[in-house]
Image: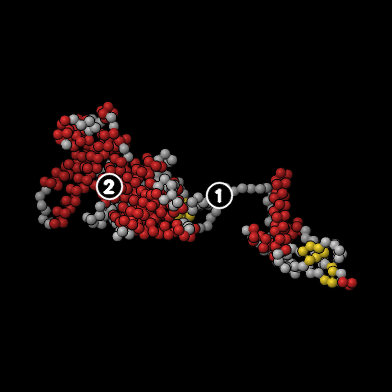
Amino acid sequence: MMQAASHSTLSDLVTGHLTALVRDAAAVNRHSRRGGRVSAAGGQASAKRRRLVHQDDVNLALSWRGDDVLHVGSAGPPPTSSSGEGGSEGAKTSRRVDLNEYLRSDMGGIVPPSELGMTVRWLAVEGVSPADEKAGGGDVTPALLLGDLGDGGRARDGDEDDGRESIRIRELQHRLLSEELRLYYSRVTSAVSSPDDPDGTAAALRSVASDTGIQELVPFLSRFVSSGLGSRRNLVRTEYCRRLVRLFDAMLDNRGVHLDLHLHQMLTPVSTCVVARKLSDGPRGDHWALRNEAGAALVKACRRYGTQYATMKPRVVRLLATQALRHDRPRATQYGGICALGMFGPRAVDAFLLPAARGYWVRWEEEMDELSSSGPTPGGRGDAASKAAKMNELSMCQQAMLDAMRVFLQEVSPAEQAGRVDGESLSDVFGERLIPMLPERSDYMLSVL
């Protein structure tokens, strides 16, 4: 049985709802010509008259209130007044309806609940609604997680915990946006996709970085960036990937938008642009600049959202370290990882790069000496171009390591440096290259410079 408090509350709610509904239905009836006047006192001419409320009046009142209409069959035409003998009007008496009998006959055996219940469901936040097993319906797309990259530089879905499922989000609907936002989105994506209008691209990126009214476009811009950088075909389009990374960087610069719910979709593709094996389909593509810009964007994202998500920065740094500090990785991958780790500051350089700096430098010097000492090969121009490309890769890796060493030597005090590294061993390996990096410039340093 229903408890007394619940019974009283439910009765008050039903009474108030029915009273308001009948009042609205009577108002609809007054403004229509449906039905007729019937007597309330058994046909006495002097008695007070009232109008009969029809079921159509109730349905119109429900529609006006935004509720569902009643799907019941008509019980016949409303009773109309008729003239009796002597000119007096009489009314047909309506049959009383027993609600209990109606519930027992038309409810189909469904027993009304004896207690009130409540179910917790996810609400849609900024156009994104996580899927619920109980809710069901609709196509869902699994969210990307920041995982380790394979040999080909492609990100794998999921992380170490294979048994843990990722959050799912529902498909985005462009029709939910206003016409102005749809036009804004088309202008921005067209400018980023077009390589022939650098001024238009720069203007679009400045607008994304400063406009505070584009929060509703964040899910769509995030999907645009992630789908563009996540395509294997687009990874060799260096300039297009650079524009997508700049769009991600512009979204990070905008303090009026929040990327919390969509940041995970873009971190993995941007990380791919840092440590991928191949990011250019020819010598014209500047994939070195793409790796630098993608690494800077990762560092900016970790600095802005690292305090909210404690595992975000460690996972990104671990990804970069595992890709850069392996001898079997390509030189381009090592370059991207070293550059990004150097941008994270002296602590990251001290923890990951300094222990491996001497070994890497010695190996690179040996490879450069071997390439320099080898004479021209009978293969012709193709072998010469391959040799020049390898020399360039080694030079870029050495420059990235020197830049990371500069971050540590210039931002860490000499006393702490003495406790962390062996200055003599570093001098033996790097030689005079470390002199411009020292914070205190002596006369000898100035003469070298």
Residue 112 lies left or right of residue 357; in this view the side is right
- Which callout, 2 or 1, points at the residue further toward the start of the chain? 1
Q: In the image, what residue occupies the spot 26% across and 29% down? A: 414
| Type of amino acid under label 1 | Arg
Identify the disc placed on residue 121. Answer: 1
The vertical placement of 411 against 385, above or below, is above
Q: In the image, what residue occupies the spot 16% across and 30% down? A: 443
Identify the disc placed on residue 333. Answer: 2
- Which is nearer the eye, 267 or 381? 267
Q: How far is disc 2 from disc 1 in space, using C-alphas?
A: 44 Å
Q: How crowded is the residue under tag 2: few (<14 C-alpha within 10 Å), some, or many (20+)?
A: many
- Which is nearer the eye, 368 or 436? 436
Q: Position of residue 217 (x, y in %)?
A: 44, 54
Q: At numbered mark 1, what does the secondary structure look like: helix, strand or loop?
A: loop
Where does the C terminus fall, quadrant-wise? Answer: top left
| Type of amino acid under label 2 | Thr
Q: In the image, what residue occupies the spot 53% across and 49% down? A: 122
Residue 187 lies left or right of residue 90; in this view the side is left
Picture quadrant of residue 308: top left
Residue 99 lies left or right of residue 431; in this view the side is right
Most extreme residue toward the right, as rendered? 86
Would residue 346 be visible to someone looking at this image? Answer: yes
Disc count in the image? 2
Q: Position of residue 212 (x, y in %)?
A: 43, 49
